[in-house]
Amino acid sequence: MKKPVFVETLRIENGIIYNLDIHQERMYKTAFFHYGTKPELKIDMAEIPSHLQKERIKCRVLYADNVIATEYHAYQIKKICSLQIVEDNNIEYNHKFVDRNALNNLFEQRNGTDDIIIVKNGNITDTSFANLVFESLEGELFTPKTYLLEGTKRKLLLKTGIIKEKTITVDDMALYKKIYLINAMVDIGDGVSVGVTSVGL
């Protein structure tokens, strides 16, 4: 059986590595669960190509029992204007696998929209690449308790009290006005969001 390979995606900008401790913690947990190892997440800033130094950098660290490779790419924030509800009651993506076939298959069902909202057993989880934050009519921010992948940005925003956890069903969506997409590369302040009315049911 082929060994699973995982990825940690980190944001680097203006010489700052964002949320390094949370990424390291997730990497430890994943590698230890699958291999009984605890690989160190070491980022050598000197390895970053000079033409990327002033960009928002997407750093991809591939690993199994140990680190396999580290890649650096310029990151462009995706424009998301519409989302499609897609149901899958069997989807599992609790570790950040390089193999995204299950997610990609659901993404193909987006019906002309920019991305998907994956619903499992009636509960809202994530998009194909991001955790979700729902803004209520009163301006409060909630993230689904029924996430697929515990994202590092999600964890930080919960830890700092900016967002709260809540079970959100498809029927609950009328209680919200806006949905933000967040991940290691994208924060709420980046404004990657859609109005609830732009979600295809």
Image (tube, rainbow, N blue to C red):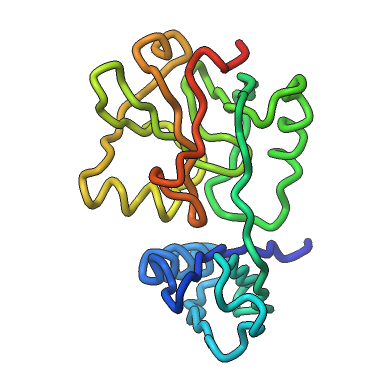
**Residue 190 in picture, x, y percent from top left:** 45, 46
Q: Quadrant of the N terminus?
A: bottom right
Which residue lies at the image location 78% right of the left edge and 63% below the top edge? 2
Left or right: residue 60 versus residue 192 is right
Q: For this rendering, which residue is in front, 2 or 176?
A: 176
Q: How many marks?
A: 0
Q: For this rendering, which residue is in front, 139 or 24?
A: 139
Q: For this rendering, which residue is in front, 141 or 101?
A: 141
- Residue 22 sits in quarter: bottom left
Which residue lies at the image location 58% right of the left edge and 27% below the top edge? 118
- Residue 119 sits in quarter: top right
Above or below residue 22? Residue 54 is below
- Residue 111 sits in quarter: top right
Which residue lies at the image location 59% right of the left edge and 70% below the top edge? 59
Q: Quadrant of the C terminus?
A: top right
Which residue lies at the image location 45% right of the left edge and 28% below the top edge? 179
Left or right: residue 16 versus residue 100 is left
**Residue 93 in picture, x, y percent from top left:** 58, 44
**Residue 123 in picture, x, y percent from top left:** 47, 21
Above or below residue 9? Residue 112 is above
View extreme (left): residue: 161
**Residue 191 in picture, x, y percent from top left:** 46, 39
Q: For this rendering, which residue is in front, 142 or 190?
A: 190
Left or right: residue 176 versus residue 112 is left
